[in-house]
Amino acid sequence: MFKRLPEAQQAMRQHPVAVTINGQSVQCREGDTVAAAMFAAGFVDCRDTAVSGVPRGPYCMMGICYDCLVIIDGQPNQQGCMTPVREGMNIERQSGARQVRT
């Protein structure tokens, strides 16, 4: 469902960024957010709901809904739609309830 337009494919070849998503090496485009890179690579969910365990994926893509929470470089509760990718980033699916710092 989510595919890059041809001109976006060309831009990705000019400035590729290598990241790891759930243990898989992925080439994405410079300027992509983590959520956009996940969609483009075929990952449609990034976390589970805490109560029922139902998979959730990015919804609003503007930082309001928190359905895009992922673990980035070992740090949980990161908003994928608000975080730009960077070379070597390690992105993992988040399971269970988010932890609130006190």
Image (cartoon, rainbow, N blue to C red):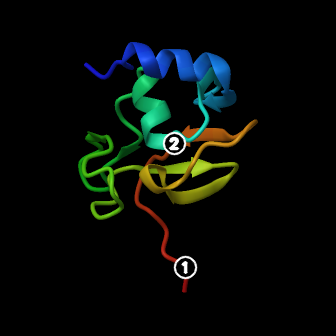
Q: Are marks 1 and 2 in contact (CB under 8 Å)?
A: no
| Residue at 41% from the left image edge and 40% from the top image edge | 46
Q: Residue at x 61, y 21 (%)?
A: 26
Q: Nearer the viewer, residue 29 or 2?
A: 29
> Is label 2 in a helix, a strand or a loop?
helix
> In the depicted view, which residue is nearer to us: 28 or 89?
28
Which quadrant holds the N terminus?
Answer: top left
| Lateral position of residue 43 relative to residue 87, left or right | left
C-alpha distance separating marks 1 and 2: 23 Å
Q: Is residue 9 above or below residue 79?
A: above
Point 74% across, 37% down: residue: 87
Residue at image mark 1: 101
Q: Amino acid at mark 2?
A: Val
Nearest the camera: 38 or 50? 38
Q: Quadrant of the C terminus?
A: bottom right
Secondary-structure class at tag 1: loop
Q: Residue tagged by mark 2? A: 34
